[in-house]
Image (cartoon, grey):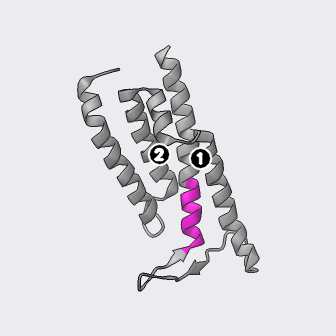
């Protein structure tokens, strides 16, 4: 579908959806949401972009191959769990550090890196499937 209206509105919709997906990812640690739902919202945004502009445009926009993104996310999630074992606590135990950045104490956790890894796995895997389906639809 090459609708002029969709091509005009798609960049705005995609930008808002990606921003919302990051919001859901970041708030998911303490409230409903997280990496999985945030990743699905991001994939929906990329799908809209693909419908509006074509699969090749999406592939250029995401820079890396979708399965490489999924692999990086899987590695990040795994490392988040393994870090706890270095500190002699059970696998996947949440660990916190409090670095001071620009004079402010910022709490960072291994749980957040796990959620980011899940986000990347979902974005990579589902985007790969969605792009394959859209390519077959263009034939």
Could you tell me if the residues under marks 1 and 2 are in contact, i.e. CB atoms within 8 Å? no
| Mark sitting earlier along the chain (1/2) | 2
The answer to if 46 sits in the magenta stretch is no
Q: Position of residue 57 (x, y in %)?
A: 44, 31
- For the point 41% across and 52% down, the residue is 21
- For the point 47% across and 17% down, the residue is 138
Residue holding disc 1: 69
The residue range painted magenta reads: 109-118
- For the point 72% across and 68% down, the residue is 82
User: Which label belongs to residue 60?
Assistant: none
Q: Which mark's residue is nearer the viewer, 1 or 2?
A: 1
Residue holding disc 2: 40
Q: 99 or 93, which lies in front?
A: 99
Between the residue at mark 1 and the residue at mark 2, the CA separation in whole angstroms equals 14 Å
Q: Position of residue 66 (x, y in %)?
A: 58, 40
Secondary element type, mark 2: helix
Q: Where's the N terminus, which quadrant?
A: top left
Secondary element type, mark 1: helix
Q: Is residue 134 above or below residue 10?
A: above
- Number of other residues with Cα within 10 Å of mark 1, as a class: few under 14, some 14 to 19, many 20 or more: many
When asked about the image quadrant of residue 116, the answer is bottom right
Question: Is residue 1 shown left or right of residue 46?
Answer: left
């Amino acid at each position: 579908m090459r609708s002029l209206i969709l091509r005009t509105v798609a960049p705005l919709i995609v930008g808002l959806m990606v921003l919302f997906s990051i919001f859901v990812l970041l708030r998911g640690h303490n409230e409903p949401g997280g990496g999985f739902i945030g990743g699905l919202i991001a994939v929906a945004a990329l799908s809209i972009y693909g419908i509006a502009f074509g699969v090749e445009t999406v592939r250029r926009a995401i820079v890396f191959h979708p399965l490489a993104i999924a692999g990086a996310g899987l590695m990040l999630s795994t490392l988040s769990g393994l870090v706890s074992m270095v500190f002699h606590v059970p696998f996947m135990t949440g660990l916190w550090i409090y670095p001071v950045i620009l004079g402010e104490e910022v709490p960072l956790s291994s749980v957040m890196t796990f959620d980011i890894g899940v986000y990347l796995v979902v974005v990579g895997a589902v985007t790969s499937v969605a792009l394959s389906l859209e390519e077959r639809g263009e034939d």
